[in-house]
Image: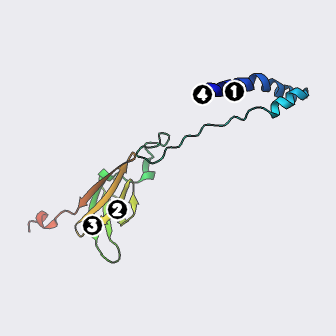
Amino acid sequence: MRASRLIAAAFLVGVAPGLWAQEAGQASAEDVERAQTAPLLEREVFDYPAAGRRDPFKPLEAGDQLGPRFEDLELSGIIYSSEAGSLVVLVDRSTQRRYRVWEGDVLGGAELLDVTPGAAVFMVTVFGVSRQETLRLKNTDKEQGG
């Protein structure tokens, strides 16, 4: 780090005045040679791999672009098919909006992994941390007293 500061200071002290003079049409051969042999400054780049840590430069909240929050979703219905793929119907309790989700689809921060005749298994990812959640259909026989 100290070496890069020294290089930057040398550039500003030694080369920059010659470049300013060159722009004014007063460049000497020495100034031109100094400018051509000046060290190349490169920008430092950071990479945040998906090793369990989130990128601190990505926003925490993106509003409605991310879709509904998983905590607000309720399983309303299941269309189960072992051959053609299954479909679940979810309702966002806060907006009453309905979503049809096929196996493998992603809704908000949740991916539908598996569907059984009575439940749906999701992989929910929040701030780079994943957990598995299961939503179950309510038993309508108990609710109707039968």
What residue did someone put label 4 on?
Answer: 1
Q: How many C-alpha atoms fall within 10 Å of the one at disc 4: few (<14), some, or many (≥20)?
A: few
* Of the two numbered discs 3 and 2 in the rendering, the one whose residue sits closer to the viewer: 2
The Cα atoms of the two marked residues, 2 and 1, are separated by 53 Å
What residue did someone put label 1 on?
Answer: 8
Q: Nearer the viewer, residue 72 or 9?
A: 9
Q: Amino acid at mark 1?
A: Ala
Q: How many C-alpha atoms fall within 10 Å of the one at disc 3: few (<14), some, or many (≥20)?
A: some
Is the residue under label 2 in contact with that under label 4 (CB below 8 Å)?
A: no
The Cα atoms of the two marked residues, 1 and 3, are separated by 64 Å
Closer to the N terminus: mark 3 or mark 2?
Answer: 3
Q: Amino acid at mark 4?
A: Met
Q: Give the image location of residue 127, x and y in percent.
A: 39, 45
Residue drawn at x 43%, y 51% is: 64
**Left or right: 50, with 23 as reference point:** left
**Left or right: 45, with 52 as reference point:** right
What residue did someone put label 3 on?
Answer: 77
| Residue that extends furthest to the left in the rendered view of this protein | 146
* Of the two numbered discs 1 and 3 in the rendering, the one whose residue sits closer to the viewer: 1
Identify the mark at residue 112; answer none if there is no mark: 2
Closer to the N terminus: mark 4 or mark 1?
Answer: 4
Element under disc 3 = strand
Quarter occupied by the C terminus: bottom left
